[in-house]
Image (cartoon, rainbow, N blue to C red):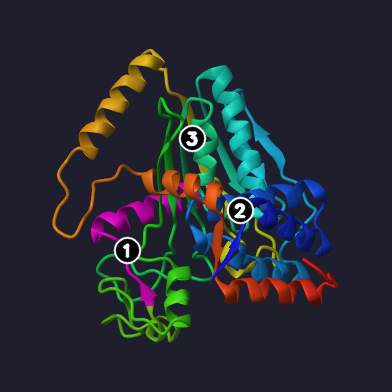
Amino acid sequence: MLIKTADELNKVIKKIIIKAGADNRNAELLSKSLVSSHLSGVDTHGIRFLPLYIEQIKSGELIPNAWPEIIKETKNTVLVKGNYTFGQVTAAFAMNLAIKKAVKFGISIVGGVQVTHTGRIGEYVEMATKRKMIAFIFTGGLSEETPVAVPYGGSKSVLHTNPFAIGFPTVNNKPITIDIATTSISGVKIHIAKEKNLNLPEGCIVDKNGNPSCSPDDFYNGGALLPFGGHKGYSLMFANEILGRIFTNSDDYFEINKGGAVWRHSGFTIIVFKGDLFSKLDKYYIRTDELTKRIRSVPPAKNFREVLVPGDYENRTRDQRIKKGIPIQENEWDAIVKIAKELGIKKI
């Protein structure tokens, strides 16, 4: 295990991405997002994705110096086309627009199409919480060419992880953040389990015949992910597919040989509104604070140390890693060093 500061990681990522063809603006936004994932403790969405991004840049699926554009707009709605640049760039661009319109009109809805991998989507709702706003982001369209998730009661994959996130501001600027996939486990975690030769928890996947399995190999041999919580997670997965792909009309904007098989059709819907739409903000803060204190005061169940509120883990990890540094797996760092050398970067 290696320890890197946020600044060290930021410089390395920017150097590699610029060398791969990105401009300074996109490199800055991408590196900020990947480092934010690590600071938040979501290491699955950090630098381990850099090799994929470089591969997609080389194949022309990802356009590293493209910039998102507005293609439809009303006073409090926008449709953004990402032009297959980094998904993190498109999502940040869209959220900034949503915040700007919500400041002026109280509520806004922003859709995104031609969106590549967006990374940790909790990052974008956190942007809104910093402006004392509540935000949602729903993603879909990942399954048009590469379905990996079975519907509840089904034996064949037809949908995808379809994550969503919700963010709520708090009085101490430590946001309440819900950021989850609608499957029982993410594809990245299955990959990590396979790397470490570990079994998966029960209830995460089925094999190619639709039978329950705990083996990562069964997933890669034609298996599929299960929705979390049975029909409940499946229902959210279904809803996110409508909001992310159908509502945004992302299928009409896809381009062959762009975006990669997973993200070619993908899209998202963002909803942002002021925290004081229906009551004064101080009252909202007082009651939110009362709720979180009440929940955290619940005696923990057996094998639990404490009861947490959504976002506690990310907020605590962020504070800790800013002070003590970010742990990086050696194999992930080795992959970054290899990419740098291939791009002609002698020292990182």
Is 242 a magenta residue?
Answer: yes
* Boundaries of the magenta span: 224-245
Is 175 a magenta residue?
Answer: no
Camera-side mark, 3 or 2: 2
Question: Which numbered disc, 3 or 1, marks the residue that appears first in the sequence?
Answer: 1
Amino acid under disc 3: Ile
* Secondary structure of the residue carrying numbered label 1: loop
Compared to 49, does 326 lie above or below? above
Compared to 225, does 237 lie above or below? above
- Horizontal placement of 294 versus 56: left or right? left
- Horizontal placement of 72 versus 36: left or right? right
Question: Which numbered disc, 1 or 2, marks the residue that appears first in the sequence?
Answer: 2
Q: Which mark is residue 35?
A: 2
Residue depicted at 24% across the width and 46% down the height: 307
| Residue 112: quadrant of the picture | top right
> How many other residues sit within 10 Å of disc 3, few (<14), some (14-19) or many (≥20)?
many
Spatial CA span between label 3 and label 1: 24 Å
